[in-house]
Structures are given as C-alpha cells and as structure tokens.
Image: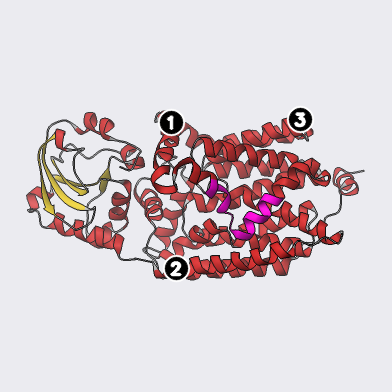
Amino acid sequence: MPVSEEIAATTPEAPAFVTRAVLAVAGVVGIAHLACSIPRGYWFDEAYMLAIGRYHLAWGSADQPPLTPALAGVLGWLAPDSVVVLRLPAVLATAAAVVVAALIAREFGGDRRAQILTAAAQGTALWVTLMGHWLTPYTLEPVQWLVLFWLVVRWVRVRDDRLLLVLGVVVGVAAETKFQVLLLCVVLAGAVLVCGPRELLRRRMFWGGVALALLIALPTLVWQARNGWPQLRMGAVVAGEAAALYGGRAGVAVTLILTAGIAGTVLALYGLWRLLRAAELRDYRFLGVTAVVLYVFFVVTVGRPYYLNGIHGVLIAAGALGLQRRRETGGRFGWVAWPAYALSTLAAAGLLVASLGAAKPDAPQDIASRTAAAYHALPPDQQATTVVMGESYIIAAYGDVYRRTNDLPPLYSTNRSYGYFPPPPESAHDVLYVGSTPDELRPHFASCTTLYDAGTDQHGFLCHTRQEPWDLLWPRLRHLDVS
C-alpha cells in the first residue's frame, strides 16, 4: 500500500471545516482593521521598520530580525507614503490568524460551533484589536506561531511526516521575524520529550525540518554573532521598561492572560485546564505544558504582555472543544460563554473606535518639520558639517520616514538598532540633536546650545565642535534602552 493510502487509512476523521462561517469572521476582522488603518499616521515601531527597510536593510539589526523591515521597505518603495498599503500585511496576518485558530479547533475535533467560537475569540482578543493593523514583528508573529501549532497538532492526528518539513520552513521564517520562536521550539520539544508523543522527535523528517529552520534563520543569527549578540541584551532592557509600561512583574503576569480578550481569556483558561487534564486531549498535553512553561518564563523575566499572543488561539480552541463536549453530554456553560462573547465584541469595537479618536497622524510629521526647519535655518557652510541625531530611535525613525518630504539629511541615533548602523562621517563636526537633553553628547563636544523649545520632550540643540573621532566615540555612546 502506498504511504499516502496507509496514512489515510489510519487517520482519525476530523469534522468538516466550516469555511464560509470562519472566513466571514476573518473578513469582518480584516475589514475592521483595514478601516482603522486609513486615517492614522505611522505607529512609531512602523516608522522604525520602514526606516530600517529603506535605508539600513541588512541580515539583522540590534533588536529585530530582517523580515519585517524588508517587507516595509518593499511596500514603501511600491507605494511611498501610503500607510494603508504598508499595513496590508498586518491586516492580512491578523485575519489569517482567525482562520488558523479555527483550523486548530477542527484538528482537535471541534464542530461547527466550536470552530466559529474559536475564530470569534481570536478575532476579538484585546491586544490583537489594538495592534492588528500595525506592520510590526509582534503583529506578524501570532499567525506564524499558530501555523506552527497547527502543523504540530495535525501531525499528531495524521502522522504525515511531510508536515515536519513545512514546520521547519515556518520556524525559519518566524525566526527571521522575531527570535521568541526559538524559545518556543525549545520549550515545545522539551514538553514533547516529557509528555509525548516522543515518536515526533525520532522522525527523520523532524530533524530535516530542524535543519531547514536553522538554514533559513542562519543569516540573521550570523549577523547577531558578528555584532556581539545585542538581541540577548534586550531582555534586560524589556524588563527595565516593564515597571513604567505595564506595572512590573505583577502587571505582566496579569496582562499575559488578559490580552486574549474577555471571551478569549475564559476559553483559554478552560482550554488550558482541559489540555492538562482531559483524557481525549492526552496526546496534546504537551501544548498545555508549553503554555505554562512559557507563561512562567515570561513572568519571571518580565517580558512584554503580547509574548503569548501566538498561543492563545490554541488554548481557545481546546476550550471551545470543552464547551462542545459539555453540550454533547447535556451540560450548560452558555451563561458564561455568551455574555463573555458579547462583552468581548463590545470591548474590541470600543477599542477600535477609541483608537480612531485618539489618532494623531500629524505628530510624527511635526517632529520632522521642526527638525527640518532648524536644520535649514543653519548657514549653508554649517549645514555641510552638521548631522541630525535623535535622542531615541523613535525620533530618528520619524525623521528618516519623512526625510524626503522635508529635505532632511540622513538621521542618526545612538539608540537601539540606530546605534549599530554606521556612525556619522568624520566631516561632521557639529550635531543638531533632537530630544529632551543632549547630555550624552555634552562631554564630547565643546558646547551644546538650545535651538528651539517645542514644549514637548523633543527640543532642538546644536552641539558644536566634536572632540573625538566618531569611530571611537560611537561604540561607547550606543545603547539599547530608551531613556
């Protein structure tokens, strides 16, 4: 018997996929996020990706693998200054995550209602609602993780080793997007080793997939190695920012869960319990263990609240299956589920509307315009020996994004990836510095004077007469934290 027929003969049947209903949910999610893209200016991380993609594209950068900047650079070239076109991949990724989450529910054995419930919960997750239309690595990552989980879950059901090679490609692409997927794979493999199915780790195709993943990820790993692994130092930076942004470790512990949304949180917690305890999900227990280990790790290391967004859909799918089993045995859980879905939908709609009302599309342009005005006010001979520097990567990225419309020279910064780009030329003796204070430059220049006070944290300063060569000064100045 051919291998394909043998696989088909021994594969447990899965329910039909409710294509129209799930695509309808995904379509609503996509249209809502597309609508939110139209009136808004660049989110600062989008500007960062676009600036890297346009002017500094390489196989890596200090805190980002190259895939998202490359994508931003291509879209910026195809449709210059179009925020909507830039955000299309993010919108598509957010909508696709809805479909993949429903496919996971189907692989678990979820019927029509379970698949729709999973899709709806995935589409109304709070953090996804907030950022699902921004072109950033953390917007593209959830669908990549969900595809990875879907391939693993499907392999457990059908034992088709060809899926493992595809899995390797997905992991490699995800590693070129964000490095957290490498941690996910280590934890996932450890959970399989402890809980089973250990057969997965013995398959030759599995190790072929590992080789493919490493091959695809190799260029950015080599870039990191050649530059002293700055990504490894980002953990301390993220933890240091957590107190102000999320309330520290306690805040991260709560938000890692609640970012799944109201309905998503209810189903994810129920699904986690079922993955760890239900007999019918025994073969998938490693997924529950993986979720717990990652949660503990991100709480202890004080990660970002969105670090588990890619696993919520798996837990939600398991929870939706649990509701299905309760229905099939005469149990009732609707008194919790339906109010949760109603509140989740209202919360998601409210967040989208609020984001439209809070949009300030002109703020980044204002920063670039003020900077350009100060630069062009300098005498022409001084302009020739002056570079523009932002205190943070955000200011530098905004300046770079609007560089052409404001006739600005290349922007520099000692912060994040900008600190690892080439330093200013030796002919640059003066610096037009934009930020709260030029304290980082004062010891290395003869003087720093105020050019303008914008009434915000982005004042303009002119630092005169550099005292040391840039190639010696730049490595000492660069830093990863935004402060």
Residue 4's spot in the image, x, y percent?
85, 46
Q: Name the mark on residue 202.
A: 3
Q: Is residue 205 magenta?
A: no
**Secondary element at tag 2:** helix
Q: CA distance from mark 2 to mark 1?
A: 39 Å
Specify the quadrant that holds the C terminus. top left
Q: CA distance from mark 3 to mark 1?
A: 32 Å
Specify the quadrant that holds the N terminus. top right
**Left-right relation of 323 to 254:** right
Q: Is residue 124 above or below residue 4?
A: below
Mark 1 Cα within 10 Å, few/some/many (few <14, many 20+)? Answer: some
Q: Name the mark on residue 229.
A: 1
The kind of secondary structure the magenta stretch mainly shows is: helix
**Secondary element at tag 1:** loop
Q: CA distance from mark 2 to mark 3?
A: 51 Å
Q: Amino acid at mark 2?
A: Ala
Q: Which residue is mark 2?
A: 354
Residue for point 15% across, 39% down: 427
Q: Residue furthest front?
A: 335
Mark 3 touches mark 1? (CB < 8 Å)? no
Image depth: mark 2 or mark 1 in front: 2
**Secondary element at tag 3:** helix
Magenta region: which residues?
254-270
Q: Is residue 269 magenta?
A: yes
